[in-house]
Image (spheres, grey):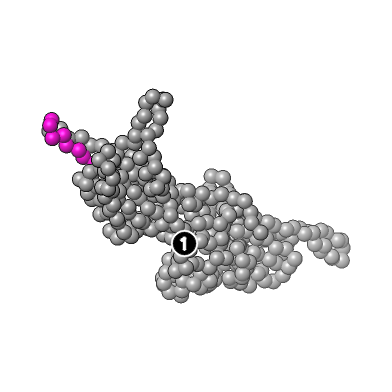
Amino acid sequence: MFNTYNNQSLRKLVVAFGSLFDEIYVTRKNDTTGTTENIKVPITFSSKEKFLRRLESNSSITDKVKTQINLPYLSFELTNVVYDRQRKRNKIKVSSAYDNNTEITSKTFSETPVDVQFKVYFYSRSLEEVLQVMEQILPTFNPEFNMRINFNDVFTNINVPISYNEMRLLDDYEGNLGSRRILIVTIAFNASSYIFNEIKTGNVPTSTSLNINTLLISDEDITPETQSIVINENLANSFYSIPSVGLNNQLTWTESGIFSENTQVIFTREDTGKEVERFSIPAGTQSISASNYTKLEQSIVQDRGLCGSGLVSGYFMYRMIVTNGNTTASQSFVITTITGSGIC
């Protein structure tokens, strides 16, 4: 039932979230000398309880030397992952991407929308430093901050909104005179992210052709003749957009030894095999007319549900099938942009 794979969807989100706070500084002024210094606040992935135990205990450099963690300090943790039903899409929808360098196609099913909840903790002994850090963090999330993350080969440059939920300040002033004061600020965030399914890769099909030998019978002799159809090989070498005349110029083929009066030209979707349009044209024409190409554009737009308006970009594969008699040839091509405005 389950296949082993690791897309590191959550790990990449955690790393990207932590990087938002790796350039936080506090300013300290020495009242004696009048000098001011900027101190970078380090950050680590740790829960509040674990960090407080480290803060309150001495770490051993040697058996005789004991040290404590210097403040200020930042830590953060992932607290919860919740399924987001409001962003749910059709789970059997297939998304794909094509790499021109490797000629490899990557495909996967729809992503799973989740709300990932984080908590960021700031530890200090000075209220002034607490206020400085709050001024650097809170205005950035007004009400949210958008990160763009490359999750995998299919889903690149994905927008992940990070929203600020709440902030709490804890002043730990209780204890004996030997205890050190600790101010702890807790800030809760929510990331509207995704978890991705297994990604499968494969080569893109190019073209196929079938040749048969047909016997022409005459009164004098029996002569074999080859019947063949070859589609323009340049059709698969470019990406196209709808509307565009560039695709129409490449929808050509050659015929030889044909016997049927009409040639059937069929266009189907590569992912489902669904027939989008079909034309019956006189044999030997070896291309489709401008009016038929206009009908093809309308059929593709209607197939994508963009009739009259809308624009979609992606990797949409279609197949052109040319058949005459018992001979058939087919070749795939890719459309990357489909615009419905003014088409139908």
Instruction: Return the residue nearer the eye: 273 or 236.
Output: 273
Q: Is residue 255 magenta?
A: no
Image-quadrant location for residue 339: bottom left
Image-quadrant location for residue 75: top left
Whether residue 16 is visible:
no
How many numbered discs sit on the rendered protein?
Answer: 1
- Left or right of 284? Residue 238 is left
Whether residue 299 is visible:
yes
- Mark 1 element type: strand
Where residue 311 appears, x then y in whole percent? 43, 66
Instruction: Return the residue nearer the eye: 182 or 197.
Output: 182
Where residue 77 appears, x then y in whole percent? 41, 50
Residue pushed farthest front?
176
As shown in the figure, which amino acid type bears the numbered disc 1? Answer: Val
Height in image: 41 above or below 111?
A: above
Height in image: 317 above or below 36?
A: below
- Left or right of 152? Residue 257 is right
Quadrant of the image for the N terminus? bottom right
Q: Residue at x 41, y 72 (%)?
A: 309
Q: Which residues are magenta?
A: 25-33
Q: Tell me the crowding category of disc 1: few under 14, some 14 to 19, or many 20 or more residues within 10 angstroms, Cα based.
A: few
Q: Residue at x 31, y 47 (%)?
A: 122
Image-quadrant location for residue 167: bottom left
Instruction: Return the residue nearer the eye: 182 or 176.
Output: 176
Height in image: 328 above or below 344?
A: above
Where residue 183 appears, x then y in whole percent? 27, 47
Q: Residue at x 37, y 37 (%)?
A: 57
Q: Is residue 26 magenta?
A: yes
Q: Which residue is mark 1?
A: 82
Instruction: Return the residue nearer the eye: 219 or 229.
Output: 229
Q: Residue at x 23, y 37 (%)?
A: 38
Where residue 68 appears, x then y in whole percent? 34, 34
